[in-house]
Each structure stands twice: as structure tokens, then as C-alpha cells.
Image (cartoon, helix red, strand yellow):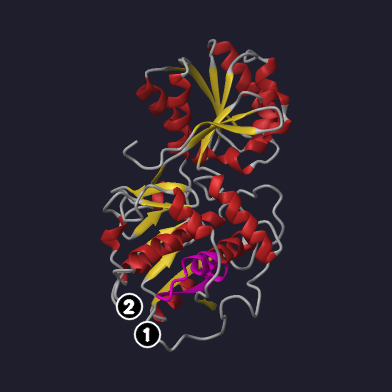
Amino acid sequence: MTETDAIPQADLFASLKRGARIVLAAGTLLLAACQSIVPKGPAPTTPTGPVQPTGPQVSEGLPTDTLRHRVALLVPMSGPNAGVGQSIANATTLALMDTKTDKVRITTYDTALGAAAAANRALTEGNRLILGPLLAEDARVIGPIAARANVPVISFSNDTGVAGGSVYIMGYNPNQSIERVVGFAREKGLSQFAALVPRGTYGERAGNAMLRAVEQAGGTVVSLQTFDRSPASITAAVKKLQAASSYDAVLIADSGKVALQVAPIVRKNGGATARLLGTELWNTEGTLAASPVLRGAWFASVSDTLYGQLAGKYRARYGSTPFRLSSLGYDAVLLTVRIARDWKPGTPFPATRLRDGGGFSGIDGAFRFGRNGVAERALEVSEVGAGTVTVVAPAPKGFGE
């Protein structure tokens, strides 16, 4: 367990304030998959802990002051997902410093040692808000425990199945990215859609999202096939697409790494001229633009504009590359600090503030929580080019656009 509060620093928060039009008011984003698969991002190195002595004061035990809000960060700090958890923890520290807040103190608890134990300890020690956990399975455990204490949970998972009650989901939702990219494709005149989705929970939900999105956009799904990521299975699925009907767009609802394997097979088996479409998972794959077969492909995701600034500041401070999900930790702190302006220390967190007003804005752009507790995000559409990825449809600045 570590304690973190803020010292004055930096300018990234100032750039957020200048760049965002949406008001930071409450209102109603691998982990990539709904099964809480952790995306590795562009060759991250193992992040290090906070630098001392120039960083925030870190000490064992509980602080004695009662003037600050106690907020718990529940992420894996050991085990296979420790790198992601440390990245998120470091990003929360950067956010505290950038906002120069003196009202929030964050304590980190290691969920790898047991999600229930971490939650119970956080509640016993007086925390009134939980940021995290990272994994959907941990959110299922922590949610009921926190609900009994009237403490909201803002999870970094993207599994909408765990949202509701006291649990809010901040993770990047594949349903929204599919709806965005399909809508963009329809605007460009494409109408016959096919889809390749992996077997499992993520693929099932992505397939359902594809069917809904195409129907809403006025297109037609001519074929939807599943695969298990083996070369033989991928080839068989693509050949079934070819046998079903012709299509002018095909969604590859998997990671960018898998898309690099699938795309050449599509091109050789009936999809030579089809527009390839991707999901938010593609945003963590840095080698897409090096593949000729993916040129012209479209995918929807949160904006990387401000994330580039965060990653640069992170590398300068911690000497390593953050995982892409680190921005969720940063934005969760921005949300908390905004609400803390009118939140009296020692009182329950005003959860209703999460669902009112115009939403929030942060590193990943505009977002707001719906009645179901799932974060709705403003997404951009990018096109894979020759050595570059270019934004072809910017993310809206707010939800009235």
C-alpha cells in the first residue's frame, strides 16, 4: 500500500483545459476485451515506481490529516499484470501533480493479492471512492463489497456486464468503436458488410454490436464468421465469407496483431478490394502502418493527441514507456478532482455527480456515464496509410456535436 498526494508541477493539465470545450462536470474506455485481456501497447518497458525525493511523499501507514479526500486505487501491483497496474498508478500521480490539488490523497492497493482483501482494506481505512479495478472479474468481486459501504467503484474494465449499481465502467467499449467505424463507412457509401470475430465473450459482443450498428446505419450484413486465431481457423472463416456473398467492407474484430495475420488471407480470398475495418484494439498496435495489406483500413478509437503528451511526460519522469491504459488512471483523477471541489472531506462521495451535466474531458477526450454506468466516449476514425496512421474523422469535442 502506498500513499500519494500532490506537489506542484507541470503543464499537461493546462493544455487539457485549453484544448477541451466540454465542461468538466459530472454526467454520464486491452483492458481490451470484455474478458479483461490486457493490451500490451507499443512495446512498453516495465514501468518503475515513483521517483524520490522529488516526487510525491510516499509512506507506509495512514495519513493523520482529515482535510483531504481518501481515494483508493485498486490495481495489480504484482503478478502478470503488474506493469499495467504500475503504469496506471504512475499516471494517477502525474494527474495529482498536474492539477496541483491539495484535496485528494490516493492510496494504492494490490488486487493481485486478492480483490476482496484489497477492497475490504480500502474501506476499513476510510476511502470513500474506489478507482479500479483493472480486471472485470475483480470488479465483480469488489462491486458488492463497495456497495454495502455506499462507495462507488470506477473500474478500468470495459466489460459492460459488470456495470450497474455502484460500479461504473471507464474502459474502452468495443460496441462504441464498432458503431463509430460502421457509421463512418456508411457515410462513405459502403453498404455490404462482413465480419470476422474471435470466439469468446469479446467476439460474441463485437458480433452483436456489428449487427446492431449496420442495421442502424441502413446497411446489410452479408456474413459474420467466427475463428479461434489459429491459421487454419482464420482461413476457413475467410473462405466462408467468400462463399456467402460479395462485400465491400469487412470488420476484423480483434487486436491489431491478429488483424495483421487476417488481412493477407482476406485479400487473397475474395476481399481484394474490400475496405478493412477495425476496433479500438487496433489503437495499441504500433506496426499497423508498416503493413501494405492494411493500407486504407479504418478503425475507431479514443484520440491519441493528448495521450502523446502524457506518454512523453511519463517517459521523462519514470524512464519507461507507459501502457496505453495509463490514461484511464489519469482521467479518473481529473474526474475526482473536479467533483472534489464541492465534496466535503469525510462525507460519502456524491455519486449522482457522475451522471449529471455535460460529461467530463481528459486525455482520452470527452466521455460521460450513461444510466447503465458505462462510459460513452467521443471517438475518432483513423486510416492506416503508408508508414502513418491519419485521423480522417476527428472525435467530437462534446456530445452535442
Quarter-wise, where is residue 272 in the image?
top right
- In-front residue for pair 354/213: 354
Sequence order check: which comes first, mark 1 or mark 2?
A: 1
Up-down relation of residue 278 to residue 343 (above or below): above
Res 230 visible: no
Kindly identify which numbered label has been placed on residue 66: 1
Residue placed under numbered mark 2 in the picture: 345
> Secondary structure under badge 2?
loop
Marks 1 & 2, CB-CB < 8 Å contact: yes
Q: CA distance from mark 1 to mark 2?
A: 7 Å
Q: In which quadrant of the rendered image does the N terminus lie?
A: bottom right
Identity of the amino acid at label 1?
Thr
> Secondary structure under badge 1?
loop
Q: Residues within 10 Å of mark 1 (few under 14, many from 20)?
A: few
- In-front residue for pair 340/192: 340
Q: Is residue 94 within the magenta segment? A: yes
Taking 271 as reference, is 45 left or right?
Answer: right
Instruction: Please report the residue visible at 38 percent of the width from the left and 69 percent of the height from the top.
Output: 129
Q: Position of residue 38 (x, y in %)?
A: 59, 51
Up-down relation of residue 198 to residue 313 (above or below): above
